[in-house]
Image: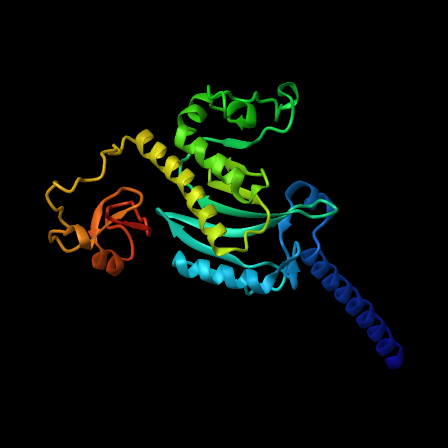
Amino acid sequence: MGIELVVIFVIIFVIYGAGWIWQTVSDIVREVRPSGAQHRVQGRVAPARSSLGGYDLTRLRETYRRFAELTQGQVHDRQLFESPKVSFTMGGSRVLLSIYESSDPAPQHFTQLTFTLPAGWPHRLEVFPQRFQDDDAKYLGVEDIQLGDSGFDPRYVVKSGDAAFARELLDAGSRQGIEDLRNLLGNDRILVSVNASRLMVRKQSILGDLNDLTIFADLSGRLYDRIWKYWQRASGIEILEDDAPSAATEDPLCPVCGSRILREDRVTCRRCRTPHHQDCWEFNGQCSTYACGEKRCTLFS
């Protein structure tokens, strides 16, 4: 009787152990290789490998490291199954640089920047190049919004639940920024998407050159600036659009140290254009204006 119990126990143990091993392996496989349905709908973050879309990942990681230094950000490159990412702040927004891989049989790769938006942001918007005739360019039953720009309207599809918002946000500067993003690398592909929590700018191709990546971030940052200014106006905050001070204007006071700023020592915030001493800006690490948070500055000339 004792031997029979031992045998039964061993059989149960083997069956249970085999089931546990099978479930563990299945879970790992699902993590590494999501289901086809998920791929078709969402795509995925590009997995790590020695090359990505024909681009050497060693060079890409070095470019991302240099970009992180330039933006005072952080590289995220520790996960086994993901390509490198960089997180940083721009104008008070948390920004993530990453590579998106489509779920096509022959995957396409995109460089994308995602900016967090202020809590309570109510608007949605999508802008992408026009590929079809007007009658075919329907998206979720929403008509393509016309902005009144004879050069822009035929070349882009604009989707939003609020046409007035879309027309106000996409002013001449924003439209030019989108056109510049489209022309970057000459591949004619760009997607700008805004929802309740983020602005996402996605450009087809892997931007592995630091100069191209910097231009991409700067143009995308201008779109975020436009959204931020729209939000400030909607919240009742006045935005001053005065021209930069002339040479004859009295030297301004530095908001950090309170001293006069001589022309040769002056930098201005790229967002709100508040002048600072260059040394004070570097010491503070960002604009000292309340709620601005910009970390980029321009030398005064």
Q: Which quadrant of the structure image shows residue 228?
A: top left
Residue 272 in view in this figure: yes
Q: Is residue 122 visible?
A: no
Q: Residue furthest bottom?
A: 3
Image position of 139 (left or right of 292): right
Q: Is residue 236 left or right of residue 277?
A: right
Q: Nearer the viewer, residue 270 or 160?
A: 270
Q: Residue at x 22, y 39 (%)?
A: 244
Q: Position of residue 63 (x, y in %)?
A: 50, 60
Indicate the quadrant containing the N terminus: top left, top right, bottom left or bottom right.
bottom right
Q: Is residue 137 left or right of residue 72?
A: right
Tally of marks: 0
* Residue at the (22%, 45%) spot, across then down: 274
Residue drawn at x 64%, y 43% is 42
Q: Is residue 84 above or below residue 201?
A: below
Residue drawn at the location 63% of the way across and 29% of the way down = 131
Image coordinates for residue 218, horizontal then vertical, percent = 42, 46
In the rendered view, would you say 103 is above or below 237? Answer: below
Colour setting: rainbow
Q: Is residue 297 shown left or right of residue 12?
A: left
Residue 73 x, y percent position in the rendering: 42, 58
The answer to which quarter of the image holds residue 220 is top left
